[in-house]
């Protein structure tokens, strides 16, 4: 399961309005090789579901993740950070054994 914090919901809602997203638009999260810790988070808006996608909805936000990425992301919460070190969505991933200082890369 992938969850969304209240702060992340507000931020995603604002982004969808700014980008004139359609009602079919959802948040696609995933993982790819790369980054300083070995794995890197991917985050985009999308409108096309693919075979094998897992679909979660939390606080009215639809989150879609491919099955391979779900192995690394299960239990993750999308959050929003507006602090001095950066502004944007962050991943609170209980599966990560270490993360880089920028929060965009992790290892299991």
Image: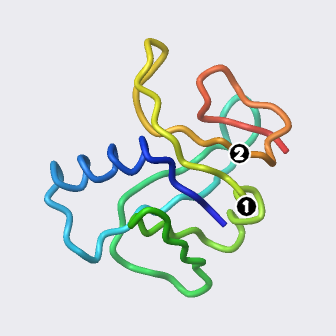
Q: Is residue 108 above or below residue 58?
A: above
Q: In this rendering, would 14 be left or right of 10?
A: left
Relative to 86, residue 3 above or below:
below
Q: Nearer the viewer, residue 35 or 77?
A: 77
Residue that mark 1 sits on:
74
What residue is drawn where x is 42% and y is 62%? Answer: 27
Q: Earlier in the sequence, mark 2 or mark 1?
A: 1
The answer to whether residue 14 is left or right of residue 108 is: left
The percent coordinates of residue 91 (x first, y second) are 60, 42
Q: Tell me which residue sits at (66%, 20%) in the image.
A: 101
87 on left or right of 73: left
Give the residue at the far bottom of this rendering. Answer: 51
Q: Residue furthest top?
A: 84
Task: Indicate the quadrant where residue 46 lies.
Answer: bottom left
Q: Does dot 2 land on a helix, a strand or a loop? A: loop
Q: Which residue is mark 2?
A: 93
Q: Residues within 10 Å of mark 2 (few under 14, many from 20)?
A: some
Callout 1 secondary element: loop
């Amino acid at each position: 399961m992938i969850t969304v914090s209240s702060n992340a919901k507000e931020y995603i809602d604002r982004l969808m309005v700014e980008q004139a997203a359609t009602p079919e638009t959802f948040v696609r999260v995933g993982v790819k090789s790369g980054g300083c810790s070995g794995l890197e988070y991917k985050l985009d808006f999308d409108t096309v579901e693919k075979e094998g996608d897992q679909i979660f909805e939390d606080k009215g936000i639809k989150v879609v993740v491919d099955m391979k990425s779900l192995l690394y992301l299960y239990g993750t919460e999308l959050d929003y950070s507006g602090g001095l070190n950066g502004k944007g969505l962050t991943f609170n991933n209980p599966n990560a054994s270490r993360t880089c200082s920028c929060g965009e890369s992790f290892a299991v």
